[in-house]
Amino acid sequence: MDIGERLRQLRERHGLSQRELASRAGLTNGTISLIEKNRTSPSVASLKSLLDAFPISMGDFFAPLEDAAPARHFYTADQFTEIAPQDDAPGPHVSLRQLGRAADHALQILHETYPPGADTGPEPLQHTGEEAGIVVRGAIEVTVDGVSQVLQPGDGYLFDSRLPHRFRNCGTTECVVISACTPPTF
């Protein structure tokens, strides 16, 4: 997906200048310009801040446009939608794969993968709703409202998503988390 072009179209559809969007998202208009020109890729947290300015969830931003189709109940692994921005920058990247189309449901389910050293970015995430997850494999450091805890397989978390939060794989092996967010605002 061309994140820069999709963001530009969304911004123009809402009648916002780059400066107005930057002000709403707490970023510089230079950063908006670089993202729209695909000269830089936003972190998960920065993209979330940008999309909250519209508002649109990350799931809806990355979801392919679908015609009205009958309700689906089952999805194979290759039918999940990747909603984390991926770029060519060096370093590990978080993978957030969404089950189904979040806009059609009151619950968002994610299959999250964090390679060693990957995190959601230096800026904490904040969004409406609640989220919960269970670590399936590896270890993840979760920080919520300034308090950090390293979670192992079988451990979980549950918190108000309006609190600043961050996820970071501080281990040496890949971490996998299955998470839920309601309403689907991420």
Image (cartoon, helix red, strand yellow):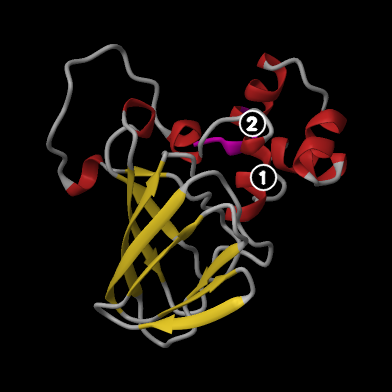
**Left or right of 130 in this view: 90:** right
Q: Which mark is on residue 49?
A: 1
The secondary element bearing badge 2 is classed as helix
Asked if residue 128 lies left or right of residue 108, the reply is right
Within-10-Å neighbours for mark 2: few <14, some 14–19, many 20+: some
63 relative to 154, above or below: above
Check if residue 178 falls in the magenta segment.
Answer: no
| Residue 50 picture location, percent across and down | 68, 40
Q: Which mark is residue 183?
A: none
Above or below — where is 102 with respect to 88?
above
Which portion, as a residue range, is magenta?
1-5
| Residue 47 x/y as whole percent | 62, 46
Question: Which label's residue is closer to the chain start, 2 or 1?
Answer: 2
The kind of secondary structure element at disc 1 is: helix
Seen at 48% across and 40% down, the residue is: 185
- Look at discs 2 and 1 and give the one toward the viewer: 1
Mark 1, Cα crowd under 10 Å, few <14 / some 14-19 / many 20+, is many
**Do residues under tags 2 and 1 come within 8 Å of each other at their CB atoms?**
no
Q: Main secondary structure of the magenta part?
A: helix
The correct choice, above or below, for 26 with respect to 24 in the image is below
Q: Residue furthest bottom?
A: 172
Q: Which residue is mark 2?
A: 7
Q: Residue 15 appears at what percent x and percent y?
A: 75, 15
- Point 52% across, 54% down: residue: 161
Q: Identify the residue at image location x=71%, y=18%.
A: 12
**C-alpha span from label 2 to label 1:** 12 Å
The kind of residue tagged 1 is Ser
Q: Is residue 100 left or right of residue 130?
A: left
Residue furthest front as drawn: 160
The amino acid type found where label 2 is placed reads Leu
Q: Position of residue 22 (x, y in %)?
A: 81, 38
